[in-house]
Image: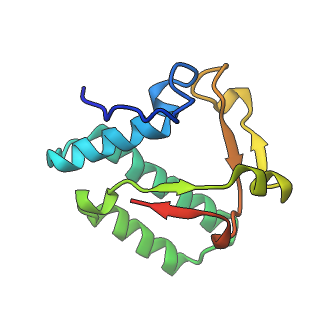
Amino acid sequence: MWCAPAPAVDTLIGRNPPSSDPWRLFGTYALDIRENDKGSAVIDRNRAGILRGAESKLADGVIDTNQHKIIQSMAAEASLDEFQPLFMVIPYDRAVSKQLVEKADIGVRARVTSDEYIIRNLPRDDFEVWS
């Protein structure tokens, strides 16, 4: 499988498995989209994750049933191009100072020794999006 070469700043290479390495995930998405892989496993998992997230937000009362139906429809009908990868660049020090960062529990990490974090409710002005 092709994967974009990692930039020198990718400190996660070797520490995190491919499923938890942002640069390798970016390369996998980009390749599947470029090659028009309609059977892309990574995109199929992304669609399923969107649906699980919508179920969770519906159960939590964050979205209503109409919004849930819209999300379901969008996830089902989205073209490969609509899964074009983006990088969210988050200034770590700012997120930590606002107490937004938590270390992922061992049970949800891709590997016990992975360096993985969870950031919930990140305000839009606290990150940049690169495509």
Residue 94 percent across, percent down from the top left = 77, 57
Give the quadrant of residue 37.
Answer: top left
Does 80 appear above or below 74?
Answer: above
Location of residue 82 by image quarter: bottom left
Left or right of 98? Residue 19 is left
- Of 59 and 74, the residue lying toward us: 74
Q: Nearer the viewer, residue 114 or 9?
A: 9
Q: Determine the residue located farthest toward the left in the rendered image.
A: 35
Query: Is 128 above or below relative to 6?
Result: below
- Which quadrant is home to the C terminus? bottom left
Farthest residue, direction front? 8
- Taking the image as shown, residue 115 lies to the left or right of residue 86, namely right
Q: Nearer the viewer, residue 30 or 10?
A: 10
Q: Position of residue 64 (x, y in %)?
A: 59, 78
- Which residue is located at x 50 percent, y 25 percent? 13
How many marks are shown on the rendered structure? 0
Q: What residue is drawn where x is 84% and y is 59%?
A: 98
The N terminus lies in quadrant: top left
Q: Residue at x 77, y 51 (%)?
A: 93
Relative image position of residue 100 (x, y in whole percent): 78, 55
Rendered image coloring scheme: rainbow
- Residue 20 in the image: x percent, y percent? 52, 33
